[in-house]
Image (cartoon, coloured by chain):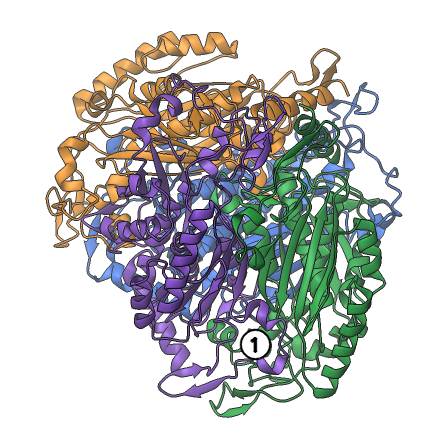
Chain colours: A green, B purple, C orange, D blue
Amino acid sequence: MLRYLSAGESHGPALTAIIEGLPAGMPLVVEYVDRQLARRQGGYGRGKRMSIEQDRVHLLAGVRGGVTLGTPVCLQIENKDWVNWRETMDPGTDARVDDRMVTRPRPGHADLTGVLKYGHRDVRNVLERASARETAIRVAVGTVGRRLLDKIGIKIVGFVRRIGQVEADVPELDPDVLQERTETSSVMCPNQVSSYKMMEHIDRTRDTGDSLGGVFEIRVYNLPPGLGSYVQWDRKLDGRLAGALMSIQAIKGVEIGAGFHGAACPGSEVQDEIFYDQDRGYYRQTNRAGGLEGGMTNGEPLVLRAAMKPIPTLRRPLRSVDIGTREAVEAAYERSDICAVPAACVIGEAVVAWELAVAAMEKFGGDTLFEFTGNWERYLASVKGG
Amino acid sequence: MLRYLSAGESHGPALTAIIEGLPAGMPLVVEYVDRQLARRQGGYGRGKRMSIEQDRVHLLAGVRGGVTLGTPVCLQIENKDWVNWRETMDPGTDARVDDRMVTRPRPGHADLTGVLKYGHRDVRNVLERASARETAIRVAVGTVGRRLLDKIGIKIVGFVRRIGQVEADVPELDPDVLQERTETSSVMCPNQVSSYKMMEHIDRTRDTGDSLGGVFEIRVYNLPPGLGSYVQWDRKLDGRLAGALMSIQAIKGVEIGAGFHGAACPGSEVQDEIFYDQDRGYYRQTNRAGGLEGGMTNGEPLVLRAAMKPIPTLRRPLRSVDIGTREAVEAAYERSDICAVPAACVIGEAVVAWELAVAAMEKFGGDTLFEFTGNWERYLASVKGG
Amino acid sequence: MLRYLSAGESHGPALTAIIEGLPAGMPLVVEYVDRQLARRQGGYGRGKRMSIEQDRVHLLAGVRGGVTLGTPVCLQIENKDWVNWRETMDPGTDARVDDRMVTRPRPGHADLTGVLKYGHRDVRNVLERASARETAIRVAVGTVGRRLLDKIGIKIVGFVRRIGQVEADVPELDPDVLQERTETSSVMCPNQVSSYKMMEHIDRTRDTGDSLGGVFEIRVYNLPPGLGSYVQWDRKLDGRLAGALMSIQAIKGVEIGAGFHGAACPGSEVQDEIFYDQDRGYYRQTNRAGGLEGGMTNGEPLVLRAAMKPIPTLRRPLRSVDIGTREAVEAAYERSDICAVPAACVIGEAVVAWELAVAAMEKFGGDTLFEFTGNWERYLASVKGG
Amino acid sequence: MLRYLSAGESHGPALTAIIEGLPAGMPLVVEYVDRQLARRQGGYGRGKRMSIEQDRVHLLAGVRGGVTLGTPVCLQIENKDWVNWRETMDPGTDARVDDRMVTRPRPGHADLTGVLKYGHRDVRNVLERASARETAIRVAVGTVGRRLLDKIGIKIVGFVRRIGQVEADVPELDPDVLQERTETSSVMCPNQVSSYKMMEHIDRTRDTGDSLGGVFEIRVYNLPPGLGSYVQWDRKLDGRLAGALMSIQAIKGVEIGAGFHGAACPGSEVQDEIFYDQDRGYYRQTNRAGGLEGGMTNGEPLVLRAAMKPIPTLRRPLRSVDIGTREAVEAAYERSDICAVPAACVIGEAVVAWELAVAAMEKFGGDTLFEFTGNWERYLASVKGG
């Protein structure tokens, strides 16, 4: 069973994750992970912190000579800013914990509820962990899962569909073309015209001190049918994927395939009829289901969308309450981005990769990559020709 | 840790669930659960099977004299239709398994992928479990969770927002008023005008042999702040709730608070500023976050919406492939509903109740109801008065 | 991931279990399970209740025509005594819960701690679940796991080593011979001389109104190397097996291979040197490790022993305290056995079978029996021939 | 829910663990953990590596100013030897993985099975993780759990009962006296005479190039009744504790209370009758059950024993097989200890502490130490006075 835990405060020494259950013999190098970390930090509309960090992952266990050992993999990303925060954030006894204390919780964050739940009198003790900085390690973990999916030919392409008022039309495209067009856009939008409009929208919004949300879409290709299962409530892959996406900071909506739009259509317009061809096996001519039927992949591309709310930190101060004095104050302000939808898209790819890797390990099993891919091949053959 | 497993085929002898981790001393009677089972079976636009079943739950363990014992609770719902299916579905050796064999998988269901994944040559072996009949036991289980929430004053109201083309406007209302208006509607829509339009829409659609989907909304009141947590990726309550809703059959989209709409707004329009009042404690004047910030309840009402695709079984046959001959055929047709959005809403309430009960047990713990409610009371006092 | 939950009070309507994660296509009939249930109820020295019950398992889900469907399997064992207890134990509201109330906790049982933990004022609310009656369903569940092990040739033989003062010498034997000799003994001891001595010991003890414990041993043959893992603390099979055995009612000690005796030997006497032979692959000439090295099966027979304390219910009353009045009283007495070591041995086989089935599913995976056995075959070939 | 994962190879850069589910506000400093790490490295009869390492834990997350934050705690222990192994063990691509390759598996270790299971051709890829070095991080993790137990007055004392042929008699003693006597012994045996005999035994064994095992005992004081539960098979604390102890490297037997000895006694001699006193509440005059009845603590001291086999690495070579050539060879030899029973005892204390901390969090819950201890206090009051 593939599983992981992560730890780490935003201004602490490092973010760390331990991944358990990977097969032995899977190639894994830091560069592969770092590429995704860099993508997370990019995107038009980001604030300054992103350039400070330049995240790099360190492998501390589970890999030797570029290949997994079957033992737990330990990933670590150092916080570059740590040197400036040591005195405040030291996990040891010497931290001057009253320095840089925050008592004005920011609306839209975990701040207020976090201090109530955990009995803190310093909001910093909450925001350090609830921060979107945590997603750096989630990207690293998901990317390790993605490495496993590579080995059975699964390809994940995420892109931005909407930023604020600008929605892009994105047709069905060859995965490689889709990826290429996405990569050439500063906002990860494969529609060039929309891409420019989005950047303009970001520029205008920066001027007003406001912030923007949006929608990203993730498509996954070459999935075998039968990942996930209908047999038990907690094994349905649609639920797991939606849960993974919704657990990303600032995500407030998730759709699969036709999603909310499909809810408004008559049944005769939202089906994907079934066809068979000796070369292709079973296939569909449409994909309104977004690749998921009965809580399982059905062999068609996975199509997921997630809605991100605008970043809650605005230049214009928001009203809040000091948790010490209970007096009305302006919320704390930490430097921030105008728009983080492209970053969220990269995180979305990672969490989707993770859930798919878990489902693939459940379906194909194996303690070695050789067993895993062998089981996959035999299953595919049985599914197609049988 | 509150957990459960369920079992049961649609035409087998019974649906069964075992719930583990409830505190002792919680009142629980079958009538409480049956009321929700009846709601699930109601709603304008349902087919005939619903009237056959008239579900009743049996308590087989964990309760005595109307009160939980702290031991596992076993729930069972007999399938009334079992008498007619015994010869075909008998779990023993004597079943005539080739009777009523299904070889034409229905698009939009688990049928095709299920037979590929589990190596079946009879689609019945899949559809019997993947069927929405399974949601009866999920409602029963969720309703047991709801009983626990009752005890700390939490109230759940679900209603239908959209059926096909008809979307209802539903204002902020007092929970009791909202519930009352919903109960008087055959489609569970608290807006009377929309309610009639929805029924008309269903009638017209029945005539054309088509089917309808829609959107339901669930609001939860009197939640304490701090259910769920930001500290680990898999403990975020927004993720868990979205996962629970998306795992319901036919659900293809989930939103929290402003959801997809919020993604199009500027940040200055989607915040919920923080206020304090000695009587109320911390509160908000708006609730765009839908009651969830940082993966936790923030004390405001929870607002969740889910999009249901139209039921995939149409009177007009859909193209499919016979899994035995691989020839093009028309998909199997089982009698069905035109619209099941009200039923889905009841199921939605149940799965949300379950996730909240799990989160409440995590937050307040206790082996007895007395410990549970005591911990809740003390926490609420600390949160408010400080 | 293979998992299960069970429920059921001793005098309630039934014991129920739900098993999740079995592959489809595995033959499973009630007779196979009932045979083990009958073995659990047998054995020299049992009390009367055993003959009342004559347990039979009912399959309520997950099986059709004698073969698993890949869906959850629901097992149920009715409590024959239920008819006599209905009025007292009814899970509904009408139970006369004050009838047959027990307020004198029995030493050596969960009675006293159970009422303190769960806030009961009737010990019956504890003893009904903590009772060894619960092991009937554990035997049923474990036997389903055993069915899976059959399919890859794994054979489990349990026998009694000691009853009270009588310890039997049992040499290395062919598994079939060992099983046969065990089956012909009323106390499940394959050494005929010791077997008679044990029965005499039981007879003498019955006369004195006392009770007896003992030690049983479980040997498992034809295990592949590599079940379990050293990579994470909670995946070590030695730990899991010991945990499973120690969680059986009245078990107070567990040993693997040389066990406590090995702790007294010099290292040079407790090793199992490694040999290789083209036909057999790697093998050992000794088996002091009891088939487990590094938290994994090493391909040699598994050898486990468990120590059972004497049954705590004696004819001679034990001192206790009334939980209502806090006055010194004699403990409650429920009719009981003199010696239940043979029954415990059958339960031991079942829990060991379950843990091995879980480990085998982890190692070989597969949604169908065909995938599972195919993966096993290929692994075995790789292990042997290299 | 308290949980953890660990990672790290023996000669890799570090051992790391992430602990999830600790309450906020618990004091935690490195010195507290380091003290237990030092104890693990001590003990008469250890080899040289112990003095190389001098383990120190680093806190990388979850703690600030010496107090837990409620967020995941990350612990790291650097491997001092890493500088000498970097070129061989580098997790990056540049490791010269063929240097220091091991092809002669050692009997009694994970070596042979590990390479078969994970498809390695270098035994090093197995032994680096299966090594007892891993127990350093288990001690660190368990010690964090112990910190929580401190807060509700629970005291854990472990000591050595047997080394090879020398068994010590250890009477009931006041916990502080027992601990003090244990601390003054180089072999952690509180019986001074036995302690000297054990050292002599170790000395003689060193001369012969052999190794020794033994038995350690762990007693836990001031436990509340009701940790663990009888309600579900996997919640029984006796099973969990036995599993934790048996999962320690080289442990082959576990006993609770009277253990195997009790299996030979008549029932009338192994009960713990129940008494009540207004000051003490319920109590026993004997403790044959070792503090566990019905899978729960019963309020009496916990008494656990574990048998450790002699260390399998002997100076006299053992027969093995080269995994490359399949030829008979002498097993690899890595420098080693003569006797590691005192170290195992420290590890035993740690894993027992962890399981008890998990059980205590389940029983008392709470997101803050204040909630946790408050719940504990109220429960104790209800248990005693009622």
Q: Is residue C250 above or below residue D55?
A: above
Which is nearer the eye, B175 or D280?
B175
- Residue A358, image x and y in percent? 63, 45
A94 above or below D363? below
Give the residue type at disc 1. Gly
Q: Which of D167 and D334 is in front in this view?
A: D334
Residue B94 visible within the image? yes
Residue D74 placed where, x, y %?
Answer: 63, 61
Instruction: Please state the horizontal and vertical placement of residue D107, each as a whole percent of the image.
Output: 69, 27
C88 sits left or right of D293 in the view: left
Residue D195 position in % (x across, y down): 54, 44
Q: How many marks?
A: 1
Query: Quick check: can you spot residue D164?
Result: no
Disc 1, SS: loop
Crowding around mark 1 (Cα neighbors within 10 Å: few <14, some 14 to 19, many 20+) is many
Q: From the viewer's perspective, tell me whether residue D33 is left or right of residue C103.
A: right
Identity of the residue drawn at 32% across and 32% down: B81
Report the residue marked by disc 1: A108
Quarter of the picture containing the C terminus of chain B is: bottom left
Which chain is mark 1 on?
A: A
Residue nearest the observer in this picture, D118 or C320: D118
The answer to whether C65 appears left or right of D50 in the picture is: left
